């Protein structure tokens, strides 16, 4: 079929208009269909809608948007509310939204307050790009602090949300090379030394970390509260990664309990070693019947007989109780659907990861059959909820078969004097070959400029296969953003080169400079540089100054050709200091210096293996052609770290130098290989 000529695009103007109208914005909320479709729906914004959304909220305090039903007014309202929360750092409950439809109001409240608000990384945790720290800084917004103040919070959901956001931010920094959490104190007259932080936050930190002071330091600076987070270290824990919850459950006698990270690691390694396990348990040899001897297998057998019955009697007493293989519940009919949906993930995970078992709903605490009243249509809904809930559970396979979770759901009729009066919900779950999660592991990291939750596959790889897994650390690549690129999380460089050292005149007993050849060339080519170094090192008791044409390039970042050289000071009386020297008067080098220092710190921990708390200070000097010098930036005058970050000893200096030797540039590896190869050829020639 042919269209009229007027329907074809003619000219650049028409093409631009078409492209402008096809601007797509992925909205961060689910549509009304999401619960049924199980996916998020994309919404298209027209050029006019996009123009409204793009307005500066600080300048345009009033917006009037009108349109026909279905034209996208609600979409615009929700997106603008999301933008208000990000721009003004306010909580969802502080935004007033008025509408005439009750269903629309409920939808807005559910999606904006419960959906976006509780999703870390989308709304409440952001990366602070304006920080002076040479650190990865996560902003968690406004937080109420202090034990008494947190206990007085009327909104318990908000208190829980703040705790979750801070805990996830800590976890993300532990797994991303360390950094700083920044929170704006919401309650007035707060004092850290008088009020503390709050027992619920302390408990969250204790559950996450083997010893909190080894990883976290707290500091109040005016109306802001900072948590300094040291990088996670294998040397201080047998685990490769920090985790809030494994989301792997097991049966512990009569309870379904989540495995802690250590138990989860043991469980996963066992499954990896054996390549999974058979769905059916191996049959035990027949045992001689013994009078008065009762075992757990007896209770499981009785539960199996109960599950296979077709009719139950009202108020009938059970012949078994809860055990490793049996869980008994009793819910009211009004909340039955909701409660089944809530408990299934953890109980199915627990039974599947142990040896299978039975869940019965409709039996009271006196072990009597009560049942619940229900229409046939409601039973169909229960069956559908069971199917959907189990089908969504994350699983991980170590075996080749990659089977699914085997289960059987049925409803046992309860009869009173021959009349049907209710049902018992009965679910049998077979043991699983590998691992079943109740949900994704609660473990976080920073990736692509966002705080992201690890998938079950990523988490398992870190837990059991760390030497072959590479993760990306947030690391800067441009001077405009301190978190715009990435470097490998783990590398293994097993060599060490000790270059010749140059001793500064008058400071030979205190400071040594390396490598000697580079130092001599720099000092001879640039008048005033050696004198500047001597003046800077005058207050240092003892240390090493490591020069490079570009520490940024050595660390895998982009080189700035306007930088004369960099020098890293490792001394016993102060944190490492990265000096940057340049000869361009009007250039801005703060971003370059910050990104280099941040990447250096991250690599010291994750590649070099340094396990102590460390910060890298930066200092920038301008060197004129006449040999005159001036300090353009000194980070030590801009930021304050906790006292523990300033403590350096002979041992920590040695550890730092050892870590630095592990992050030497690849050229040194090539040089070492060439030397060894030449030596090999020489030996072969000599032996002939």
Image: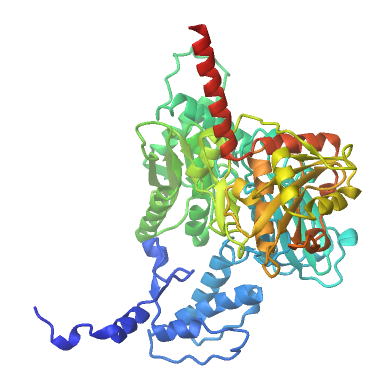
Snapshot quadrant of residue 201: bottom right
Is 627 in front, or is 33?
A: 627
Snapshot quadrant of residue 450: bottom right
Left or right of 616 on screen, residue 432: left
Examine the rendered structure and indicate whether residue 331 appears above or below residue 435.
below
Left or right of 503 on screen, residue 332: left
Please provide percent x and percent y for residue 626. Answer: 77, 62
User: Is residue 307 visible to the viewer in this orientation of the structure?
Assistant: yes
The N terminus, quarter of image: bottom left
Is 114 in front, or is 465?
A: 465
Snapshot quadrant of residue 637: bottom right
User: Is residue 164 visible to the viewer in this orientation of the structure?
Assistant: no
Please provide percent x and percent y for residue 240. Answer: 61, 37
Examine the rendered structure and indicate whether residue 424 appears above or below residue 52.
above
Q: How many marks?
A: 0
Please provide percent x and percent y for residue 375. Answer: 38, 60
Q: Residue at x 69, y 48 (%)?
A: 601
Q: Residue at x 46, y 29 (%)?
A: 301
Left or right of 163 on screen, residue 56: left
Examine the rendered structure and indicate whether residue 666 appears above or below residue 687.
below
In the picture as drawn, the residue positioned furthest to the left comes out as 1
Please provide percent x and percent y for residue 522. Answer: 72, 48
Q: Residue at x 68, y 42 (%)?
A: 604
Is 453 in front, or is 431?
A: 453
Q: How is the image coloured?
A: rainbow
Is 31 in front, or is 287?
A: 31
């Amino acid at each position: 079929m042919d269209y009229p000529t007027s329907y074809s695009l003619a000219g650049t103007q028409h093409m631009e208009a078409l492209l402008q109208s096809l601007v797509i914005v992925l909205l961060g909320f689910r549509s009304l269909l999401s619960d049924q479709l199980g996916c998020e729906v994309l919404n298209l914004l027209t050029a006019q809608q996009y123009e409204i959304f793009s307005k500066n909220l600080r300048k345009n305090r009033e917006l009037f948007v009108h349109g026909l039903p279905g034209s996208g007014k609600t979409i615009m309202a929700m997106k603008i509310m999301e933008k208000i929360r990000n721009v003004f750092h306010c909580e969802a409950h502080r935004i007033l939204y008025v509408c005439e439809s009750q269903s629309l109001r409920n939808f807005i409240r559910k999606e904006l307050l419960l959906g976006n608000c509780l999703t870390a990384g989308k709304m409440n945790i952001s990366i602070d790009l304006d920080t002076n720290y040479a650190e990865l800084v996560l902003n968690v917004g406004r937080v109420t602090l202090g034990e008494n103040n947190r206990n007085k919070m009327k909104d318990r959901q908000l208190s829980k949300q703040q705790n979750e956001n801070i805990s996830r931010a800590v976890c993300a920094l532990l797994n991303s090379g360390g950094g700083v959490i920044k929170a704006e104190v919401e309650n007035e007259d707060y004092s850290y030394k008088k009020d503390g932080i709050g027992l619920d936050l302390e408990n969250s930190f204790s559950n996450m970390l083997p010893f909190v002071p080894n990883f976290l330091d707290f500091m109040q600076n005016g109306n802001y509260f900072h948590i300094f987070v040291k990088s996670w270290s294998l040397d201080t824990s047998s685990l490769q990664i920090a985790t809030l919850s494994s989301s792997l459950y097991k049966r512990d006698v009569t309870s379904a309990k989540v495995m802690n990270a250590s138990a989860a690691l043991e469980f996963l390694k066992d499954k990896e070693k054996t390549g999974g396990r058979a769905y059916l348990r191996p049959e035990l040899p027949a045992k001689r019947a013994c009078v008065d001897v009762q075992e757990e297998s007896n209770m499981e057998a009785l539960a199996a007989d109960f599950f296979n019955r077709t009719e139950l009697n009202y108020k009938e007493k059970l012949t078994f109780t809860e055990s490793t293989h049996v869980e008994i519940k009793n819910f009211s009919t009004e909340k039955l659907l909701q409660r089944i949906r809530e408990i299934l993930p953890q109980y199915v995970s627990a039974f599947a990861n142990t040896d299978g078992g039975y869940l019965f709903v409709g039996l009271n605490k006196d072990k009597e059959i009560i049942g619940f009243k229900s229409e046939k249509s409601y039973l169909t809904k229960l069956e559908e909820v069971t199917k959907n809930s189990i089908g969504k559970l994350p699983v991980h396979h170590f075996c080749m078969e990659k089977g699914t979770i085997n289960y059987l759901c049925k409803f046992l009729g309860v009869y009173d004097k021959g009349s049907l009066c209710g049902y018992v919900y009965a679910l049998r779950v077979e043991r699983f070959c590998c691992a079943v999660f109740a949900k994704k592991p609660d473990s976080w990291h920073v990736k692509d400029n966002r705080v992201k939750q690890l998938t079950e596959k990523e988490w398992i790889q870190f837990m059991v296969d760390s030497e072959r897994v590479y993760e990306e650390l947030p690391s800067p690549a441009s001077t405009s953003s301190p978190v715009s690129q990435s470097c490998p999380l783990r590398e293994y460089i097993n060599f060490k080169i000790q270059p010749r050292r140059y001793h500064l005149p008058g400071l030979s007993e205190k400071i040594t400079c390396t490598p000697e050849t580079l130092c001599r060339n720099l000092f001879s080519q640039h008048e005033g540089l050696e004198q500047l170094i001597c003046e800077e090192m005058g207050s240092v008791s003892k240390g090493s100054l490591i020069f490079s044409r570009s520490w940024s390039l050595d660390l895998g970042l982009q080189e700035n050709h306007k930088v004369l050289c960099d020098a890293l000071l490792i001394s016993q009386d102060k944190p490492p200091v990265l000096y940057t020297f340049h000869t361009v008067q009007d250039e801005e080098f703060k971003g370059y210096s910050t990104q280099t220092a941040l990447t250096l710190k991250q690599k010291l921990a994750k590649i070099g293996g340094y396990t102590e708390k460390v910060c890298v200070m930066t200092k920038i000097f301008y060197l004129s052609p006449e040999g005159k010098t001036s300090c353009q930036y000194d980070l030590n005058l801009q930021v304050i770290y906790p006292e523990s970050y300033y403590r350096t000893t002979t041992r920590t200096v040695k550890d730092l130098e050892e870590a630095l030797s592990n992050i030497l540039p690849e050229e040194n590896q090539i040089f070492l290989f060439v030397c060894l190869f030449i030596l090999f050829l020489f030996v072969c020639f000599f032996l002939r």
